[in-house]
Image (spheres, coloured by chain):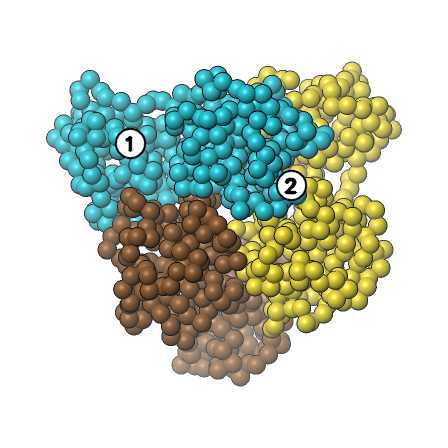
Chain colours: A cyan, B yellow, C brown
Amino acid sequence: MPVISLTTDFGLADPYAGIMKGVIASICPAARVIDLTHLIDPQDVHGAAYVLSDARPYFPEDTVHVCVVDPGVGSGRRIVALRTAAGVFLAPDNGVLSLVLEDPAPVEVFRVENPDIFLHPVSRTFHGRDVFAPAAAYLASGMPLGRLGAPVAAHSLVRLDFGPHAGFDKDGGLTGAIIAVDRFGNLVSNITRAHLQEAFGIREDEDVSVCVQVGDQVISGIVGSYQSVRQGTPLAIIGSTGRLEISVNGGNAGRYFVAGRGDPVTLRRDGTAGPGAA
Amino acid sequence: MPVISLTTDFGLADPYAGIMKGVIASICPAARVIDLTHLIDPQDVHGAAYVLSDARPYFPEDTVHVCVVDPGVGSGRRIVALRTAAGVFLAPDNGVLSLVLEDPAPVEVFRVENPDIFLHPVSRTFHGRDVFAPAAAYLASGMPLGRLGAPVAAHSLVRLDFGPHAGFDKDGGLTGAIIAVDRFGNLVSNITRAHLQEAFGIREDEDVSVCVQVGDQVISGIVGSYQSVRQGTPLAIIGSTGRLEISVNGGNAGRYFVAGRGDPVTLRRDGTAGPGAA
Amino acid sequence: MPVISLTTDFGLADPYAGIMKGVIASICPAARVIDLTHLIDPQDVHGAAYVLSDARPYFPEDTVHVCVVDPGVGSGRRIVALRTAAGVFLAPDNGVLSLVLEDPAPVEVFRVENPDIFLHPVSRTFHGRDVFAPAAAYLASGMPLGRLGAPVAAHSLVRLDFGPHAGFDKDGGLTGAIIAVDRFGNLVSNITRAHLQEAFGIREDEDVSVCVQVGDQVISGIVGSYQSVRQGTPLAIIGSTGRLEISVNGGNAGRYFVAGRGDPVTLRRDGTAGPGAA
């Protein structure tokens, strides 16, 4: 039973995602469609890139991941399909696959341009329905990627800057940024377990003696569970995607810190917090 | 694999839609259920009618489209099932099928009244669960429509007024209204490609020399893609349902124009915009 | 075709629920996953308990109902799986199954602790992905519950207080509380048909001569349908879950009464409304 995942900024009030599923059911009735989210902020290519990156390890390897966050719809921007070890990805060539492209090199990359697979007339504003959905359904039905169009060189694909990258400060600290705030108010940073290991020799998800600074407040240590601190108290923890997250046990860190996407997060060895620390 | 689509005003926080799917899975395990939307404004029969109308061409022809936007639940209002060339529709007879009824005449129309197919006790407030879901599941299982109840004359079905209809002004212009605002702020009008062709001889989705007035502002021309204008600039375009839409490239037309449902949209040949034009 | 239902507080913007479905599709491709809701208020165990309780009668008996409303994730709280006549339930042992446990005693209860069924590494913050989803998928595939871990005594499971319980006042009235407000503004109380029968001898969903007090306003009688009163008028009705609900015909009772969860609802025989009655 083939699987197709959908990631869009269509929202849930309009029937756009449902219409894509109608097209898919018309072409590949056996396909199972799984919504990753339709609530990407409108045209937020970066946010969609994180969703695809975080979700792909948890899907069957032959899943067709479709992403329609496509500010350039109707322009000359390419639509591409690529196969990697993690699955097949179908998206506009606008950088939304930047993080997927950090995996080992894709096996195949093709432009999606064969009008035989489109719904006609192809609208200027809803390629999700007329291009992405039928292409995904045919791929889920077993059509080879090469039928979509001409081969594309992987190095020619648009890659976005996801900075400020987490990196070392000259005083031995590590600085990153908040890349997402989830429904619970958890502040997800771009500082990964690998960064922590490199900077501080941290190997396990155990309590770690570093100071984590968000805004003008400092959290002491990275803990192993929310319950390591009292109810209502902030904490730093390695989240489910392997990234450092700032949370409040039983609370909402986004409101607690009045912090959001793009705000810096700085780590220092315990006792070396900067002058702005609370 | 039979397909059932759902369109309701139940929202997504309450388990009402999920419970309908439980009922369907209990009766017709093979059915694939596709959500069109559960975020129709409460009791907004007009909004639901547009969703059904826009979605139906993109579904398999034997899809059972279920619409539960039903302010009259518990009253004497009829529930009807009808088969057209576009699919089977199951809905309260409150006008929500008005646009579907503009298709070639339905082949079959029946009242949904056979208590053998209902869940008992039938609640007074949730026919989605006790009437619509089991009826849809039995239809998806292959039950003939005639088992639902007595035949109904198609001309007796409730039809709603969807005006103000797009129509000609005495000075040669064309006036319509905004019928929906989507998540991107696109203002969808009731002016169709057919209206434009009749009024101005417009045949293709190419740049067209008309002035489009929304509020006291005028947009010059209908363009073929969002990128035909600069970022942040308003435009008029034929949208994916064949209706004229007002958008802002990379922006939100609803906020730009402070316009919404019911507001007028007027088109004139270029150079003939009214005195209110900006 | 096995069915898995999902009830979480993950929201719909983040891909958490979709990732659970990816895990399920990887392990048990045949499973059909039905969302009950992902919009439980964050960490609202009581709200989730009502959803499970209201939905379970409408699903196939071998459905695996998964609930991830789990403020204790990462702590020592148990995860349990239990089979009752109504289905299989998989949830943290935090009281969310309290209402399900009012059914006839569960046939089997086991702790979910067998690492062979988890995804590794098991994160500290997302057991939905690493524990609940694979456990549900293996159960849907036919794995016996006993493979999950050690048996658990049903009486040891956490049970929450769902009070104030509906109960008799010393003056012969019946007092309950609002337990939920749905999208239409209907105020759902914890007063059931059984309470009404015991207090007032009410047997049928017919118009009943009691006064229903919400805040300082009194509604006269329990009606059989919304249309029993004029548009815009408040009413009391037995809702689809068998609980007394306060509604406004064509309106929103939550706004009309400025009432919400936890507010009291008092019933008295007609003519005996308290001094606060309007």
Amino acid residing under circle 1: Thr
B51 versus B238 height, above or below: below
Question: Residue A145 — which label?
Answer: none
- Image point 22% across, 44% down: which residue? A224
Pointer 1 indicates a residue of which chain? A
- Image point 30% across, 35% down: which residue? A243
Q: Is residue C85 visible?
A: yes
B249 versus C151 height, above or below: above
Q: Percent x, y for residue C277?
A: 51, 70
Q: Which sits earlier in the primary sequence, circle 2 or circle 1?
A: 2
Residue under label 2? A27
At mark 2, the secondary structure is helix
Numbered-mark total: 2
**Could you tell me which quadrant the C terminus of chain B lies in?**
top right
Query: Callout 1: few (<14), some (14-19), or many (20+) C-alpha neighbours within 10 Å?
Result: some
Q: Percent x, y for residue A191?
A: 29, 30
Amino acid residing under circle 2: Ile
Pointer 2 indicates a residue of which chain? A
Q: Is residue A123 visible?
A: no
C176 versus B19 height, above or below: below
Question: In the picture provided, is B155 more to the left or to the right than B209?
Answer: right
Q: Say which of B137 and B49 sits in front.
A: B137
Q: CA distance from mark 2 to mark 1?
A: 41 Å
Q: Percent x, y for residue C234?
A: 59, 63
- Image point 31% across, 71% down: which residue? C154
Question: Residue A192 — which label?
Answer: 1
